[in-house]
């Protein structure tokens, strides 16, 4: 380990009376280990009270004070109050017990740590919403520790990462699990190796301060999804899903799979329909559906999120993408969000496709979609990743006082609902749509 072996601080910490599990000990000194110090950071997730925050905080402080002098560091949480309560107070106390001097400027949200002639400043940031990203802009950091990362908006986390431009800077993330399609899991945990990050998963047994009776009590406190997340430390979909009958095993397919005795192949589809949920600020979602025997298959999709992409598309650009999704197929009709008047007019103006306004009775539509899924009449290509992601997130609003879903993660869900209700109880036996120049087409039977 070269010079790092001789760092007085490390030697003192190793002799300190800390009761650590193997995973906590690993987190404490990974950055000083010849095998692991080439990594750009570490990610820890897992059960509540599993000891990941404790070990990460101490490790971050020791690392900063051992290798840097006169630098700025960031410690982030959902709010400044929560990160002080959950991490900073204990970190300051531990570092003082190791001989460091701590001077806290509470009103200015930073504290200075001094040891052995070195002094570094630690800024505290809260990442509660999208506007929080502006709070961390402009500062140069030698490292960042993000507590409860899954609770912070992506824009804030990415801005914090961008601030770490000092040579030798590293990233430290910890969080409790959320839904399996959470952006942090998909972009950081699932891609840890690609991003040159270490990853460690914690369980309740990794916290030696917890007795077996306390662990059992946590197991009794939670049920369902919360048990999966907080006790088992799994990234599980939330309770109250609108379509709990949907199964990624039973209702998805790959091209070429045999479905109902027929191959899911382009030349086997009998008819095609496209459904559209149009958005300018919100995402736009278009689904391409093909009929295979008694089933309708979502073959492909177009999903554009202007907030994620950092730009908006015009009606004509969305129309061009719609044409790309359809390709050379002859489709029966396009069913479109009834509020998207300008986009419906754009489709009609081109006089290429027949377009219908969707029935937007949400609850009735959800009931029909549920029936189709239960009956095995709907299936989804595994390439339709945004649809599969929304299935795991689309849930009922339990605080609304009436039957309605939460208005988020619902764009592919809406276009799917438009499609199913457009079938309108005709048994898929056929129908006609008359093309009218520059006129929105409707059909009731």
Image (cartoon, helix red, strand yellow):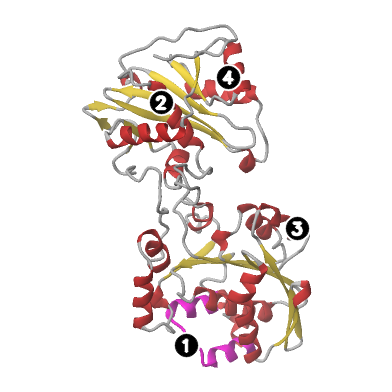
Q: Position of residue 222 (x, y in %)?
A: 38, 67
Q: Is residue 381 above or below residue 193?
A: above
Q: Is residue 60 left or right of residue 300?
A: right
Q: Local crowd at mark 1 within 10 Å, few (<14), some, or many (≥20)?
A: few
Q: What SS does tag 4 mark?
A: helix
Q: Position of residue 32 (x, y in %)?
A: 57, 77
**Range of the magenta residues?**
8-30
Which residue is the site of mark 1? Answer: 19
Residue 188 visible somewhere in the drawing: yes
Number of the label disc, if any, that sits on residue 344: 4
Q: CA distance from mark 4 to mark 3?
A: 41 Å
Q: Which one is in front, 3 or 294?
A: 294
Q: Position of residue 397 (x, y in %)?
A: 48, 48
Q: CA distance from mark 1 to mark 2?
A: 60 Å
Q: What SS does tag 3 mark?
A: loop
Q: CA distance from mark 2 to mark 3?
A: 47 Å
Number of the label disc, if any, that sits on residue 137: 3
Q: Which one is in front, 63 or 409?
A: 409
Residue at 61% x, 21% y is 341
Which residue is the site of mark 2? Answer: 421
Residue at 40% x, 56% y is 236
Q: What SS does tag 1 mark?
A: loop
| Residue situated furthest left in the rendering | 261
Q: Main secondary structure of the magenta part?
A: helix
Residue at 55% x, 92% y is 16
């Amino acid at each position: 380990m070269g010079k790092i072996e001789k760092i007085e601080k490390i030697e003192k910490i190793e002799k300190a009376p800390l009761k650590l599990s193997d995973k906590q000990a690993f987190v404490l000194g990974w950055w000083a280990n010849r095998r692991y110090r080439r990594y750009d950071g570490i990610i820890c997730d897992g059960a509540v009270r599993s000891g990941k925050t404790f070990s990460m905080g101490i490790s971050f402080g020791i690392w900063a004070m051992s290798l840097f002098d006169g630098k700025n560091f960031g410690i982030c949480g959902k709010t400044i109050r929560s990160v002080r309560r959950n991490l900073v107070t204990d970190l300051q106390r531990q570092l003082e017990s190791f001989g460091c001097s701590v001077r806290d400027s509470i009103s200015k949200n930073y504290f200075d740590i001094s040891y052995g002639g070195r002094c570094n400043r630690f800024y505290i940031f809260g990442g509660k919403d999208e506007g929080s990203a502006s709070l961390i802009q402009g500062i140069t950091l030698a490292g960042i520790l993000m507590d409860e990362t899954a609770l912070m908006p992506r824009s804030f986390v990415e801005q914090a990462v961008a601030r770490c431009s000092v040579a030798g800077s590293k990233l430290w993330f910890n969080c409790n699990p959320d839904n399996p399609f959470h952006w942090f899991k998909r972009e950081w945990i699932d891609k840890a190796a690609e991003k040159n990050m270490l990853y460690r998963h914690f369980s309740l047994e990794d916290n030696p301060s917890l007795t077996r009776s306390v662990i059992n009590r946590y197991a009794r406190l939670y049920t369902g999804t919360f048990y999966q997340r907080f006790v088992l430390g799994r990234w599980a979909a939330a309770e109250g899903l609108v379509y709990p009958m949907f199964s990624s095993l039973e209702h998805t397919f790959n091209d070429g799979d045999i479905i109902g005795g027929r191959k899911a192949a382009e030349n086997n589809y009998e008819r095609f329909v496209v459904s559209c949920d149009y958005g300018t600020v919100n995402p736009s979602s278009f689904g391409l559906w093909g009929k295979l025997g008694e089933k309708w298959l979502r073959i492909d999709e177009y999903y554009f999120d202007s907030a994620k992409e950092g730009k908006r598309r015009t009606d004509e650009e969305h129309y061009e993408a719609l044409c790309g999704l359809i390709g050379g197929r002859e489709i029966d009709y396009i069913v479109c969000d009834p509020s998207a008047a300008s986009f419906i007019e754009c489709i009609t103006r081109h006089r290429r496709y027949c377009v219908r306004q969707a029935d937007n009775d949400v609850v009735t539509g959800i009931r029909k979609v549920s029936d189709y899924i239960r009956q095995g009449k709907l299936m989804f290509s595994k390439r339709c990743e945004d649809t599969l992601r929304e299935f795991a997130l689309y849930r009922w609003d339990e605080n609304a006082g009436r039957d309605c879903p939460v208005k988020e993660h619902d764009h592919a869900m809406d276009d799917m609902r438009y499609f199913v209700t457009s079938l309108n109880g005709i048994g898929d036996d056929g129908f006609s749509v008359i093309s009218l120049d520059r006129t929105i087409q409707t059909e009731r039977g």
